[in-house]
């Protein structure tokens, strides 16, 4: 579990995050959503320590990450896997070498054991065919899958994904979303995802945090979104008429399901 | 501004010293950098040093017009000019362009494409893993390149002397060993170590702290070459003033 407590962050006098608090639960996909410039990426970078917080705390399993020394942080970071928006794969290494890298750096496993883990991770993300290829030779969706494989190879407790669907077609986005969701449940990871892909929100959002101008505007589940009365959230999520219609249809569907499940009233 | 950059540069150097996460991986990276810096620039070093030696021979002969000056003086001048100045300084100025821009653009690209962030998230000290092997590799390999440049420069001088009919091989070799001062070689090595440190650390600094995109990477690469060249010339004068008094 990750706790974000009253986190504030400013750049050059401009407040980017102001008193943001949230709890990211284990075994769930926690989504941070918001418009561009709302502070999603800054919040994620504060959580992983790439940005220092001006005020507030970030706690990993109850331990205050913001107050830790570099050495203590290193121990936490070894439990973190991260998928970057641009994948951040090492250009000079093949797909296989990219996934091998964390194992070579942090474990004393035998080559055979490392190879077994790399193969199982690449198999898990359906990438057995791209073993020997370089990142420049594979598609965007495949790069994301390599990024996921590299992020999970050390069996992390926490998985961060910064806009995992950016630049992908809807079908590939769904594949990536499903993969992240499955991995989260399978390994009981605390997963935090930054996104503005509404498909992801409605498909895999167990816990959703909506940021607006650096503030926490709304928090809830994907089901709560359907009935939310928050104007800003509704404007953001259901921006087009098509999505508004879809929301209304979904509301009706849920209401009908509820009525069907309720026992008939006695005369 | 100067003190801001100088302080940040010193902090970067200080940040490189930490316990390696995996000695094997650091060793692998060091060897990789030795190959990149050494073999990567061997060709250009060979070409420029042969021509530097040749040109020095021809120009020295052109200036020594008095019949009272023996021809062997030409090879003495060529030898000392190459060892004291041309091999270490000229070669390192060329290496500032070849190696320095490569280091700056490689680190800059890693920074912009979030590869450095990815390493940080894994818990790796990126300064130690990315910068230290480059500096150590430059300190190991650049003095070797300077020695090679010295030998090839003298060979170039000998060839040019014979081809232009200025002086024969025998005369050239006689002058080469005449009044040879071994301290000059020591001085050249001190210069090459100093310049290797300047080239690698300055370009690493500008590459590591790039902010922005492709344009900024190019700018950082150019700035690193310009600053390295200026510092090389400053250090060149400083070392000469201190050690050759």
Image (tube, coloured by chain):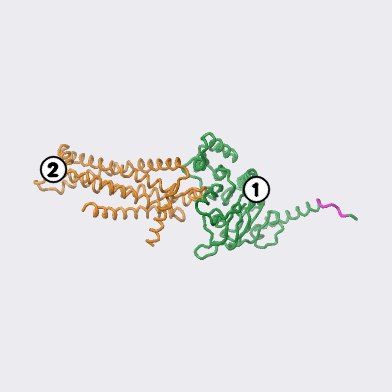
Chain colours: A green, B orange
Task: Please give the count of numbered marks on the rendered protein.
Answer: 2
User: Is there any visible trace of residue A91 in the rendered image?
Assistant: yes
Q: Quadrant of the C terminus of chain A?
A: bottom right
Q: Where B160 sits versus A244, above or below?
A: above
Q: Could you tell me residue A18's position as x and y percent?
A: 58, 63
Q: Locate residue A151: give its quadrant.
A: top right
Magenta: main secondary structure: loop
Tags 2 and 1 in contact by the CB under 8 Å rule? no
Q: Does dot 1 land on a helix, a strand or a loop?
A: loop
In the drawing, does residue B18 fall left or right of residue B92? right
Q: Residue furthest bottom?
A: A13
Q: Chain of mark 2?
A: B
Q: Residues within 10 Å of mark 2 (few under 14, many from 20)?
A: some
User: Is there any visible trace of residue A242 in the rendered image?
Assistant: no
Q: Which residue is mark 2?
A: B71
Q: Residue furthest left?
A: B68
Q: Does dot 2 land on a helix, a strand or a loop?
A: loop
Q: Nearer the viewer, mark 2 or mark 1?
A: 1
Q: Residue furthest top?
A: A112
Q: Chain of mark 1?
A: A
Residue depicted at 51% across the width and 65% down the height: A13
Q: Work out whether residue B30 or residue A75 is closer to the camera in this orientation and state it.
A: A75
Q: Could you tell me residue A199's position as x and y percent?
A: 64, 51
Labels 2 and 1 share a subunit: no
Q: Could you tell me residue B226's position as x and y percent?
A: 34, 54
Q: Which residue is mark 1?
A: A27
CA distance for labels 2 and 1: 85 Å
Q: Work out whether residue A37 or residue A21 is closer to the camera in this orientation and state it.
A: A21
Q: Where A235 sits versus A156, above or below?
A: below
Q: Work out whether residue A261 or residue B240 is closer to the camera in this orientation and state it.
A: B240
Magenta-highlighted residues = A261-265
In the drawing, does residue B238 fall left or right of residue B129? left
């Amino acid at each position: 579990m990750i706790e974000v407590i009253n986190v504030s962050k400013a750049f050059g006098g401009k407040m980017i995050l102001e008193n943001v608090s949230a709890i990211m639960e284990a075994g769930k996909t926690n989504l941070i959503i918001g418009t561009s410039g709302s502070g999603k990426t800054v919040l994620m970078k504060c959580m992983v320590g790439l940005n220092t917080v001006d005020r507030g705390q970030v706690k990993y399993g109850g331990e205050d990450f913001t107050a830790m020394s570099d050495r203590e942080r290193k121990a936490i970071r070894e439990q973190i896997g991260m998928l970057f928006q641009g994948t951040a794969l090492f250009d000079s290494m093949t797909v296989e070498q990219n996934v091998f890298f964390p194992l070579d750096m942090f474990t004393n496993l035998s080559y055979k054991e490392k190879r077994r883990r790399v193969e199982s991770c690449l198999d898990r993300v359906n990438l057995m065919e791209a073993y020997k290829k370089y990142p420049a030779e594979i598609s965007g969706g495949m790069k994301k899958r390599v990024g996921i494989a590299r992020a999970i190879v050390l069996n992390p407790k926490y998985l961060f994904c910064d806009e995992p669907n950016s630049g992908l077609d809807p079908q590939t986005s769904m594949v990536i979303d499903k993969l992240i969701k499955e991995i989260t449940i399978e390994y009981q990871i605390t997963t935090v995802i930054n996104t503005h892909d509404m498909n992801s929100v409605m498909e895999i959002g167990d816990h959703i945090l909506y940021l607006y101008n650096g503030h926490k505007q709304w928090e809830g589940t994907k089901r709560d979104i359907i009935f939310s009365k928050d104007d800003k959230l509704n404007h953001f999520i259901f921006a087009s008429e098509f999505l508004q219609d879809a929301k209304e249809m979904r509301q009706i569907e849920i209401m009908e399901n509820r009525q069907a499940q309720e026992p008939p009233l006695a005369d | 501004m100067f003190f801001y950059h100088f302080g940040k540069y010193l902090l970067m150097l200080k940040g490189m010293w930490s316990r390696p996460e995996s000695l094997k991986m650091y060793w692998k990276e060091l060897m990789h950098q030795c190959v990149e810096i050494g073999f990567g620039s061997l060709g250009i070093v060979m070409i420029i040093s042969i021509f530097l030696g040749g040109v020095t021979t021809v120009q020295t002969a052109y200036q020594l017009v008095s019949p009272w000056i023996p021809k062997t003086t030409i090879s003495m001048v060529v030898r000392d000019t190459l060892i004291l100045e041309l091999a270490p300084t000229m070669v390192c100025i060329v290496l500032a362009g070849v190696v320095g821009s490569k280091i700056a653009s490689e680190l800059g690209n890693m920074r912009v494409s979030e590869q450095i962030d990815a390493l940080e998230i894994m818990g790796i000290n990126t300064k130690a893993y990315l910068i230290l092997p480059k500096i150590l590799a430059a300190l190991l390999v650049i003095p070797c390149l300077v020695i090679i440049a010295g030998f090839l420069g003298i060979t170039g001088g000998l060839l040019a002397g014979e081809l232009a009919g200025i002086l024969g091989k025998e005369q050239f070799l006689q002058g080469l060993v005449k009044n040879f001062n071994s301290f000059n070689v020591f001085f050249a090595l001190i210069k090459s170590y100093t310049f290797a440190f300047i080239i690698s650390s300055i370009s690493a600094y500008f590459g590591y702290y790039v902010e922005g995109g492709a344009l900024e990477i190019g700018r950082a690469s150019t700035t690193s070459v310009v600053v390295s060249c200026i510092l090389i010339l400053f250090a060149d004068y400083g070392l000469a003033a201190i050690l050759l008094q």
